[in-house]
Amino acid sequence: MSLRQARTTLSVRTHGQGLTDITREVADFVRRSGIADGLLTAFIQHTSASLTVQENADPDVLADLNDFFRRIVREDPTLYRHTMEGPDDMPAHIRAALTSVQVSIPVLTGVMALGTWQGLYVFEHRARPHDRRVVLHLLGS
């Protein structure tokens, strides 16, 4: 059996702090790849945003996550040396360090093996909207 691979880069426009669902776009990439079984790696090319697999049924989960990170990493410029890019930048770097810039998801029979209530999200940690790049790489058969 020979391994096949597919890769692309998604451009994701965020709306400021919060979670942006990219599950559908990633699922479309997996489907178009024609790879039945393998491992999908998603990697965000930024240091002030992250990726997470989270609940996709109750929007309160996403709001609570965002609120929690605001509480534990305050946007107080008196706390940080790095303030040149605004009061939200250093806290965004810390939030990204506490989460993940990469996730791996198994692909089985041509679909991501996410649970019933799971979705893949870009977690924007900056206050303003941003254009984020997410590299997708699928290796399998």
Image (cartoon, rainbow, N blue to C red):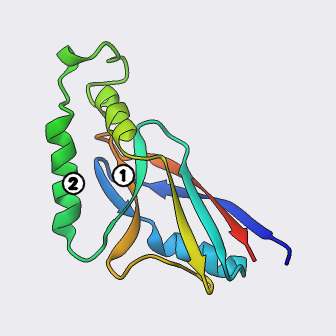
What residue type is disc 2 on? Leu
Q: Quadrant of residue 63?
A: bottom left
The N terminus - image quarter: bottom right
The C terminus - image quarter: bottom right
What residue type is disc 1 on? Phe
Q: Which residue is mark 2?
A: 65
Q: Quadrant of residue 27?
A: bottom right
**What residue lies at 32% left-to-right and 78% top-to-bottom?**
117
Distance from the alpha carbon under mark 1 to that under mark 2: 10 Å
Q: Sequence order check: which comes first, mark 1 or mark 2?
A: 2
Q: Give the answer, above or below, for where 50 lies relative to 95.
A: below
Residue lying at the far right of the rendered structure: 2
**What residue lies at 44% left-to-right and 76% top-to-bottom?**
114
Q: Give the answer, above or below, for where 106 lies relative to 78.
A: below
- Percent across and percent down for residue 91 are 29, 31
Q: Which class describes the residues within 10 Å of circle 2: few (<14), some (14-19), or many (20+)?
A: some
- Percent across and percent down for residue 17 are 28, 47
Q: Give the answer, above or below, for where 80 lies relative to 72.
A: above
**What residue lies at 22% left-to-right and 51% top-to-bottom?**
66
User: Regarding mark 1 in the picture, which secondary structure is present there?
Assistant: strand
Q: Is residue 20 left or right of residue 23?
A: left
Marks 1/2 in contact by CB < 8 Å: the verdict is yes
Q: Which residue is mark 1?
A: 123
**What residue lies at 50% left-to-right and 40% top-to-bottom?**
46
Q: Which class describes the residues within 10 Å of circle 1: few (<14), some (14-19), or many (20+)?
A: many
Residue lying at the far bottom of the rendered structure: 109
User: Regarding mark 2 in the picture, which secondary structure is present there?
Assistant: helix
- Percent across and percent down for residue 138 are 67, 66
